Image (cartoon, helix red, strand yellow):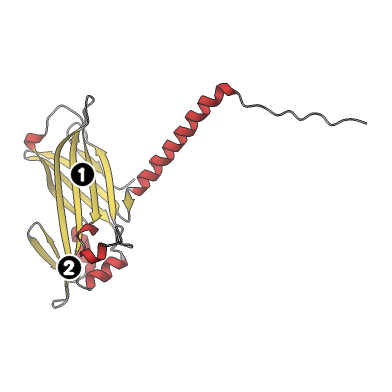
Amino acid sequence: MSSAAPTLTAKPDPSLAPLRRWAAALLLGLLLVLFGRAALADGVELSHLATQRVEEGLELSFGTRFELPHAAEDALLKGVPIYFVAEVTVLRNRWYWRDARVARAQRSWRLTWQPLTRQYRVSTGGLHQSFTALGEALAFLRGVSGWRIAEAKELEDEGRYYIEFSYRLDTSQLPRPMQIGLGSPQGWGLSLERSLSLNPDFSLRIPASP
């Protein structure tokens, strides 16, 4: 009568434990980066963005693609103003200390519905423009060109620069009763954040979102 062959069980090599821990930490870091990037865009797509150094300083142009959430459109038709905000920070890399903030610019748009004239009105920087269709009003506030984001005196020829860009539907400017207990109103998620390096001549051009 033959006996069954003994089963051999491979024991983990203790010397490989640090390598396994390092690989697990690396995988976790990659997952966090991927999920972090995904969280930086909520309902908004960056169609194009470009910077150009001019005699007066640094100018930026950008465009976005998005549709107004149904909850926001419903509130708009009930008389609630809707605000959009774009923010840009110009930073200079420094190896010896935290990066230096060179300049910061902000632009906002106020979208309202005028029931008497049955028109949509966009207000920005003291200027006002009316539109007969919501799509036309949204197209107007989805981007801008020739926006001065830094003055010439704030830029140096030497150094590495980058920008932090964000565009969002600003729920913080909604009427207070709509914010209490909600944090960020449900169904209002429209936001985009990007960090982009500038070329040595301060130029940057991306045709579409990654």
Would you identify the image quadrant in which residue 88 lies? top left
C-alpha gap between disc 1 and disc 2: 29 Å
Q: Is residue 194 left or right of residue 24?
A: left
Q: Which residue is mark 1?
A: 50
Q: Name the residue rendered at 18%, 42% in the picture.
A: 89
Q: Position of residue 174 (x, y in %)?
A: 21, 62
Which label lies toward us, 1 or 2? 2
Q: Name the residue rendered at 11%, 65% in the picture.
A: 129
Amino acid type at mark 2: Thr
The earlier-in-sequence mark between 1 and 2 is 1
Would you identify the image quadrant in which residue 36 lies? top left
Tags 1 and 2 in contact by the CB under 8 Å rule?
A: no
Q: Name the residue rendered at 7%, 36% in the picture.
A: 152
Q: Name the residue rendered at 58%, 23% in the picture.
A: 14
Label 2, secondary structure: give it. Answer: strand
Residue 196, relative to residue 39: is it above or below? above
Q: Position of residue 120 (x, y in %)?
A: 17, 69
Q: Residues within 10 Å of mark 1 (few under 14, many from 20)?
A: some
Disc number for residue 60:
none
Q: Nearer the viewer, residue 49 or 109?
A: 109
Q: Among all residues in the image, which is located at the extreme bottom?
A: 116
Amino acid type at mark 1: Ala
Q: Position of residue 165 (x, y in %)?
A: 23, 45
Label 1, secondary structure: give it. Answer: strand
Q: Position of residue 184 (x, y in %)?
A: 29, 58
Q: Which residue is mark 2?
A: 112
Residue 107, relative to residue 53: is it above or below? below
